[in-house]
Amino acid sequence: MSTGDATALSTESARTEIPDAADIPVVILCGGMGTRLREASEKLPKPLVDIGGKPVLWHIMKTYEHYGFRKFVLCLGYKSDLIKNYFLAYRAQVADFTLTLSDDHTPQFHNAVGDEKWEVTFAETGLLTGTGARLRRVAQYLTGPRFMLTYGDGVGAIDVGAVLSDHVKSGRLGTVTGVRPSSRYGELETDGNAVTLFAEKPPQTGWVSGGYFVFEREFIDKYLDDDPALLLERHPLQQLARDGELTLHNHDGFWMGMDTFRDWTELNQLWDSGSAPWRVWTD
């Protein structure tokens, strides 16, 4: 990308859509079993666990769509058939249609409800495959110069256009979004045995990875191998950081991973209240 293009990208990142976003694939890791979320995910793959009646995966895709991204590559594993079937029946779940049972049973849809400007590739990447190996196995679908990547279980008010802009300006191979999630415990400040401050769930002081990555395509060839147990978060990203090729995009706003039943309950409460911070899109 030229210097002029990078400048334009930085300027456009504040808008709803960014240039060329529709051509940049978004890889979403959807293969995990979600064992810590057993109460909500025992019968479903974790990305299909709902927030407000819609899968968390849908919420993530809507965030990207808001900024102009249209191409998705889903790395499937555990209960992959349920994810495929959700999208195959996507329109029929929400739109009005007539079904004549005396012919070929093809629905006649009466409105555009359920239409999305999405192109979704469903890739079987194995049941117990590591996150790095899952990414390696979808390399054939990543034909452009760069791609986005995130996990199928975390939501946030992430300006993915700004993440991409920071990545382009850095000139490095990878960019990770750093977040400060709230602590699960109240924090006390004291003076002797007197409590001077009681803060419920204060944000952590250090940065942690919130997912929402950008990578240059060459990252796959240089840092990933064919080991089916390869974890993206270990050697590949650790080596990338040691090589000085990993950029931090700071995100001080809302972010939350859906790791436990408690997280799921809290996210649904936020959605039901009408004040979900990650809902950057409009219907």
Image (cartoon, rainbow, N blue to C red):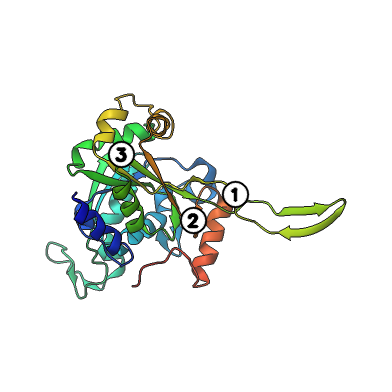
Circle 2: is it few (<14), some (14-19), or many (20+) Cα within 10 Å?
Answer: many
* Residue type, label 2: Trp
Quadrant in which residue 158 is drawn: bottom left
Residue occupying the far bottom of the picture: 110
Circle on res. 205:
1
Residue 242 appears at what percent x and percent y?
41, 30
Q: Quadrant of residue 93?
A: bottom left
Give coordinates of residue 115: x percent, y percent. 23, 66
> Is the residue under label 1 in contact with that under label 3 (CB below 8 Å)?
no
Task: Please tell me whether mark 3 sits on a helix, a strand or a loop.
Answer: loop
Compute the Cα span from label 3 to label 2.
24 Å
> Which quadrant holds the C terminus?
bottom left
Residue at mark 3 to residue at mark 1: CA–CA distance: 27 Å
Q: Amino acid at mark 3?
A: Leu
Q: Earlier in the sequence, mark 3 or mark 2?
A: 3
**In the figure, 85 relative to 104: above or below?**
above
Cα distance in 3D space between marks 2 and 1: 14 Å
Expressed as whole percent of the image width and height from the top left, the position of residue 86 reads: 31, 55
* Residue sitting at the far right: 193
Callout 2: SS: strand
Q: Nearer the viewer, residue 44 or 273?
A: 273
10 Å neighbourhood of mark 3: few (<14), some, or many (≥20)?
A: many
- Compared with residue 119, is residue 94 higher up or lower down, i.e. above or below? below
Q: What residue did someone put label 2 on? A: 255
Q: Which amino acid does the dot numbered 1 rest on? A: Thr
Residue at 28 percent of width and 55 percent of height: 87
- The image's mark for residue 173 is 3
Contact (Cβ within 8 Å) of mark 2 with mark 1: no
Mark 1 burial class by Cα count in 10 Å: few <14, some 14-19, many 20+: few
Q: From this viewpoint, is residue 117 visible?
A: yes
